[in-house]
Amino acid sequence: MAPIIELMDVTKQYDAATRALDGLSLSMEEGEWTSIMGPSGSGKTTLLNIIGCLDSPTSGNVRVAGTEVTGLSQKRLTLFRCQNVGLIFQQYHLIPYLTALENVLVAQYFNGAVDESDARMVLEDVGMGRRLDHLPAHLSGGEQQRVCIARALVNAPRLLLADEPTGNLDSGNGAKVLELMKRLHKEGHTMVMVTHSPDVAALGDRIIRLVDGRVASDDRNGESRSKVVGDIAMEAEA
């Protein structure tokens, strides 16, 4: 089976002085949970945005779910993203004047098929069935993030991308969101998660560490992966 994500010699140059990704090549398998780590400015979010079709590389090729997305028009790229990618952000990006249910329905609208029963079902599945009619301002941070996860799931994407999904949450709400992410992974979802937390990264099947837009380490093996996590934790404390 072909990988669900393939990047071949991908470079992202923002200006003469800023190269976020530098000839990056890697692939990710379907059903895999990949944690992306690295210092600030290492290219983590740029990588996630390119995989999620929110940005395009300056050079190189990107294939997602069997489709070469590098040359797609903006319109086709947006449609492809709506149909294949679920996005979960640190900043929740919920529309403040819409209820939890309506925020999820918006994702269906952009995919071209609105089904309120599906939206209700996915909100119930993430534990928000009793909060459907609440505005974001009346939800806790953890509840808002669960609405974001429901929004990411409602179109049944093949790929879930998360950028620091617990970064704005206290430890209790963060733990609940991570338990939900672990459950989704067990159910077969392919996940790519950017995180600064070694403990969160260790939940994945694989840890890729970026430095200066390149892969500094790539570990699937449990023993060596623990060493990578330990090294990153020591760096953070230094």
Image: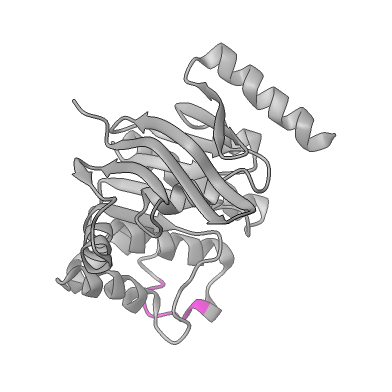
137 up-or-down from 111: above or below = below
The answer to whether residue 82 shows anywhere in this view is yes
x, y (%) of residue 123?
33, 63
Residue 38 vertical placement versus 125 (above, below): above
Quadrant of the image occupied by residue 60: top left
Is residue 62 rendered to the left or right of residue 96?
Answer: left
Q: Which residue shows up at 47% across the image and 20% down it?
A: 220
Q: Please tell me how many numbered marks the rendered image carries.
A: 0
Residue drawn at (28%, 33%), measured in percent from left and top? 30
Question: Would you identify the image quadrant in which residue 78 lies?
Answer: bottom left
Residue sitting at the far bottom = 97
Outermost residue toward the front in this view: 16
The magenta-colored residue range is 131-136
Q: Which residue is drawn at 55% across and 34% down?
A: 214
Which sits in the foreground, 124 or 118?
A: 118
The kind of secondary structure the magenta stretch mainly shows is loop
Residue 234, x across and y down, in percent: 78, 28
Q: Is residue 5 left or right of residue 174?
A: left
- Quadrant showing the N terminus: top left
Quadrant where the image shows the C terminus: top right
Residue at the limit of the structure toward the right, as seen here:
238
Q: Position of residue 124 (x, y in %)?
A: 32, 61
**Does the stretch in magenta take in 17?**
no
Residue 176 visible in rendering:
no
Q: In this view, does 31 lie above or below 141?
A: above
Q: Where in the figure is residue 84, as x and y percent of width and height?
A: 24, 53
Is residue 3 shown above or below 10? above
Of residues 82 and 137, which is closer to you in this image? 82
Q: In this view, does 102 lie to the left or right of 179?
A: left
Q: In the shown orientation, is residue 41 left or right of residue 86?
A: right
- Colour theme: one colour
